[in-house]
Image (spheres, helix red, strand yellow):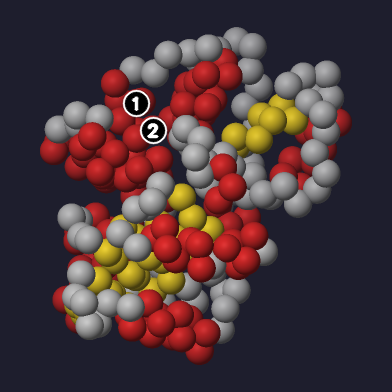
Amino acid sequence: MLTIKQLLERGDDCVVLDRHLRWDTAHLSAYQDCLSQYSDYNIFGIELQEDIPTPKNYHRIDHHNDYATKPSALEQVAAAVGVPLNREQMLIAANDKGYIPAMIAAGATKEEIASIRRRDREAQGVSEADEKLAVESIDKHLRRFGSLTVVKSMTSRFSPICDSLFPYRSLLIYTDAEWIFYGAGKAGLTQRCADEIHAGKMFHGGGDEGYIGTVQYIYSQEQIEQFVKHIIGQYEHI
């Protein structure tokens, strides 16, 4: 999102409206006043949940759930405004769409990957305390079931755990309020959880080996534990 904002702010014919929403509060209704204010312009909503009717001049930019086959949001925006991406922007787009494997496939060096992942965590609001809790979570709460690695996290920020454990085959991270599964097996989970995804209780992205998870606090602690137990059960005898 920061890269998209930087790209757009270089132009003279774009108005960038940023109300600094988190992904879980990113609703179109937060910009409802802008829809009428800019009714004569093309409006592009980037990864916003459409909780109100959209006008004819509105265009959705997204690459999650039903839009998971589309290019990254950065690539879609660049195409819409006719701006080519430089190498760093292309790697940032690859990271957003397909995490470290996509950056490797795009020819990123170890230094480039480390830099982009570090800045990604910072942009998400991951603090030094979160980084330390991630290390502690791995030390104290990591379990393995066949090709599945499971970590009960002591922080709601999962990215430092993912980055520390990469490469992994399959990874499940959870708290009492949510869980996210990464890697091989994601496609099958996505199919089995299609109703929950359609209902807005879960989300997914990143391709067949990307990620799928629950929205925070949608499910009870007991339900989260049942999900985790079910997923582990598919791997513990492999």
* Residue 140 horizontal/vertical position (percent): 20, 81
Q: Residue at x 19, y 29 (%)?
A: 107
Contact check, label 2 and label 1, Cβ < 8 Å = yes
Residue 81 is left or right of residue 162, and the answer is right
Q: Which residue is mark 2?
A: 93
Amino acid type, callout 1: Met
Please name the residue shown 40% across and 47% down the image: 207
Q: Position of residue 215 (x, y in %)?
A: 55, 66
Residue, far left:
110
Front residue of 134/54: it is: 54
Q: Residue at x 33, y 70 (%)?
A: 172
As drawn, the label of residue 90 is: 1
CA–CA distance between discs 2 and 1?
A: 5 Å
Give the quarter of the image for residue 109. Answer: top left
Number of residues whose C-alpha sits closer than 10 Å to that of mark 2, classed few (under 14), some (14–19) or many (20 or more)? many
Q: Give the position of the C terminus as an image quadrant.
A: bottom left
